[in-house]
Amino acid sequence: MSKTIKSVKNIPSWFNLKKYEALRTLDVQGWSRQILIRTVVAELLESDAPEDKQEALDWINEIAISPVIAPADDSGHVENWLTRIKRNPCITYSVWPTEILTLYAYAQEFDSGDAYMRNLRAACKASLHGKATLEEDALVRQSFDHAMSDQEIDSEGMMNLTVDLSATDEQLIADYKRCLTASRKALGKVAPQQNFCAKDFCKWFENGILPYIDLTLWARAHNISITQNALGEAIFPNEDDADTTERIRRTTKPQATYLLREETCRALEYQATSEKIAEKMSASPPPKSNTGT
């Protein structure tokens, strides 16, 4: 039977709100790092593999010592994207033309020997020769990404689109918005509508989101539950006149759940890396002129 912590006096001794003060100064890159680590820990705790459980405990122990995790060295990842962007100015971190390597990977998938792919190939051949049945035509006219999703092949939130550049910007943007909404719904993807800003980070800090996540992850790892009353007193110790239990229930817990979603974590990472790439590009010296003096 799992143990239940009902009093703030029994909150683990490693928990200290002063350790979280550094969160006040974090930007999107810093918050992305914090949320990513907690998301990984949550996923590891869901695993039945002993090595995953141990890795989760290692992270939890590190968080207990210093909950504000230092930035990771992602310079190689950023430099790789900078190289790609320099080769092709059409590329951004979240939108880019389909590359030959991607088409090759799709071809490998398409050439696999399972029955579904064999049916797809036969339907495509029939359609190209004008001999497709209505069922075959419907099969080959579906989105590739939707078809892969139906086969439980995860696209990690990415989707391929064909864009007619001869259309006006107004038309393209309007159509893109409609396509984006419909595609996310069809693929079961949900993402924040706007970029995160300092106001969001301030709200997360004030609502004790990270302390709440860390305490609940620690509790899960040790098969312990903590009442919302104990969590409220631990996270908001100076709010004697407020109903901290209700604040946990109505604000802190829902926001923590939202931040630990894969889509939110990925959106934070995309924004953080995009901003880092933009900073690198703006800091790069302009190309030397070839004109003589």
Image (cartoon, grey):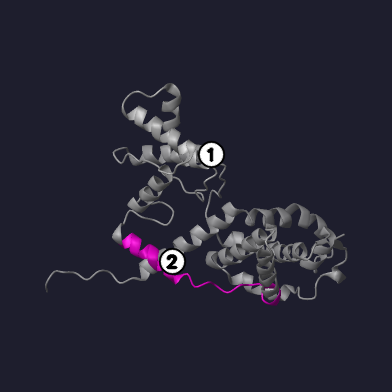
Q: Residues within 10 Å of mark 2 (few under 14, many from 20)?
A: few
In magenta segment, residue 216: no
Of residue 155 and residue 234, the one placed in the foreground of this image is 155
Q: Residues within 10 Å of mark 1 (few under 14, many from 20)?
A: few
Mark 1: which amino acid? Asp
Q: Residue at x 67, y 61 (%)?
A: 49
Tell me where residue 128 appears, x and y as whole percent. Answer: 32, 29
- In the rendered structure, the answer to whether residue 52 lies left or right of residue 94 reads right
Q: Which residues are magenta?
A: 63-86
Mark 2: which amino acid? His
Most distant residue in the bottom direction: 65
Q: Secondary structure at mark 1?
A: helix
Q: Residue at x 53, y 72 (%)?
A: 72
Tell me where residue 43 appears, x and y as whole percent. Answer: 65, 58
On the image, numbered disc 2 is attached to which residue? Answer: 77
Which of the labelled discs sits on residue 30, or is there none? none
Q: Are marks 1 and 2 in contact (CB under 8 Å)?
A: no
| Number of the front mark, 1 or 2 | 1
- In the rendered structure, the answer to whether residue 288 lies left or right of residue 244 reads left
Tell me where residue 194 appears, x and y as whole percent. Answer: 53, 51
Q: Earlier in the sequence, mark 1 or mark 2?
A: 2
